[in-house]
Amino acid sequence: MRCFLISDNIDTQMGMKLAGINGVVVHEREEVLSAFETAVSDETIAVIFMTRKLIELCSAEIYDFKLNRSKPLIAEIPDRHGESGISDTISEYVSEAIGLKL
């Protein structure tokens, strides 16, 4: 199984390529959806990394896929200009799980 990147930024693509992850750079909504459909139809891809901007561009389709299919895993990553806010999300999950605000 392998990973694949769908990015809106060539710098993100180059960084992932250095880690051995191939991918594509797209900018328009139709390009994103086409790359996404191609990636999910490839049985060898286990994880698709997508930049936050692209997920927001096609949020309805991406979230529908996440809710209705288990494979491949869709992982949102920040690009070099954004932040993921992941620490806030993790803190919220922990707070809900144990009932304590961190």
Image: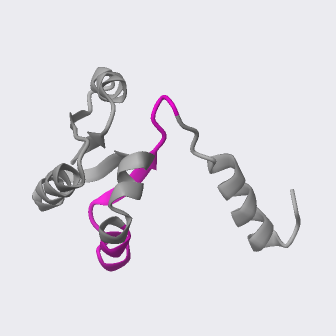
Image height of 84 relative to 65, above or below = above
Tell me, yes or no, whether the highlighted magenta stretch contains residue 79: yes
Which colouring convention does the figure follow? one colour
- 26, 2: nearer the viewer: 26
Residue 55 image position (x, y, % from top left): 38, 55
Name the foreground residue: 28 vs 4.
28
- Residue, far front: 28
Q: Is residue 19 magenta?
A: no
Q: Residue at x 48, y 40 (%)?
A: 78
Indicate the position of residue 58 as horizontal and vertical percent values: 32, 61
At x 40%, y 52%, the residue is 75
Residue 28 lies, in percent from the top left, at: 23, 47
Q: Residue at x 17, y 55 (%)?
A: 30
Q: Is residue 98 above or below residue 79?
A: below
Span highlighted in magenta in the image: 63-81
Task: Give the camera-side residue of 56 and 91.
Answer: 56
Q: Quadrant of residue 63?
A: bottom left
